[in-house]
Amino acid sequence: MKKISLRFGGIVALDGPSFEIAPGEICGLIGPNGAGKTTLFNCVSGLYRPDAGSIMLGETDILALRPDQVAGAGIARTFQNLGLLPTQTVLDNVIAGASHRARTGMMAAALGLPSVAREERRERERARAVLDRLGLSGYESHLASGLPLGTLKRVELARALMLEPRLLMLDEPANGLIHEEVEELGALVRELRRELGFSVLLVEHHMGMVMSVCDHLVVLNLGVKIADGPPEQVRRDGAVVEAYLGGS
Ligand SMILES: Nc1ncnc2c1ncn2[C@@H]1O[C@H](COP(=O)(O)OP(=O)(O)OP(=O)(O)O)[C@@H](O)[C@H]1O
Ligand SMILES: [Mg+2]
């Protein structure tokens, strides 16, 4: 992405950051509260329209797409405050992750064509396989409400995987998890990346996870990119240390 900028009234949430994520790489996006990390996710997923700049996925101009088309292009995300439907079962929440596909068949669905039932069965099978891979088989028919946060975070990850993403964006996946769960999650993200080959953009305040999981770090502060490089180098960067110590 290049020179992304976005203001909300007088607040400059993003002030021109540019960076690239290599195929198959886990890129950490870090910075103090209010740095613009979630805003940047919202720009990539088509929820916000930047005032200027460009975002490309390979040859595809992401800013020309609607949010469902961005998902269709292979960009999946999880939300800082969980985006699950509490009154739906875990299985239905995960199936909903692929709903951009079903949309193309809305007319067929209205007509009750057999192809629809076939597609539903296929999506159900895929969702079961993803839940199984994430160790969540036992939760299929549970309602999302009432499950522990660590489980819900994995359900949200399962929903994102239904898109078979090229880029998986995770917004604070470790927030609220206990130490052991954070380590498991970090290992899982690396395993899934190896198995499925996607790139990851990881927003996370948990520095232990960031340092152990990421291949590359980008640091934002007040909408400006202040560092970009290998984790070890970024960690020693004076501007980064200053932003963290000075900010909180
Ligand atoms: N919809 C909005 N309307 C107005 N201001 C917004 C909106 N979304 C974000 N902002 C502002 O933009 C700035 C960046 O916010 P953002 O949520 O992107 O930060 P963040 O880096 O994700 O922070 P955190 O680590 O706390 O999640 C903040 O000053 C925030 O108040
Ligand atoms: Mg945020």
Image (cartoon, helix red, strand yellow):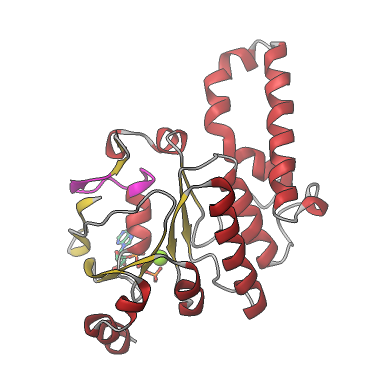
Residue sitting at x 44%, y 62%: 202
Residue sitting at x 58%, y 45%: 161
Q: Is residue 135 left or right of residue 80?
A: right
Residue 215 image position (x, y, % from top left): 41, 65
Residue 167 image position (x, y, % from top left): 44, 47
Residue 241 figure quarter = bottom left
Q: Is residue 164 magenta?
A: no
User: In the picture shown, does residue 84 fall above or below 36?
Assistant: above
Magenta residue span: 44-55
Q: Nearer the viewer, residue 226 or 68?
A: 226
Numbered disc total: 0
Q: Is residue 88 left or right of residue 137?
A: left
In this rendering, does residue 226 appear at all?
yes
Q: Quadrant of the C terminus?
A: bottom left
Residue sitting at x 44%, y 66%: 214
Q: Quadrant of ligand 1?
A: bottom left
Residue 91 image position (x, y, % from top left): 73, 44
Residue sitting at x 37%, y 34%: 66
In this rendering, does residue 84 appear at all?
no
User: In the picture shown, does residue 131 fall above or below 149?
Assistant: above
Residue 235 figure quarter = bottom left
Q: Is residue 178 left or right of residue 139?
A: left
Q: Nearer the viewer, residue 242 or 114?
A: 242
Which SS type dominates the magenta stretch? Answer: loop
Work out which residue is located at the far bottom of the displayed protein and give it. 245
Residue 213 image position (x, y, % from top left): 49, 68
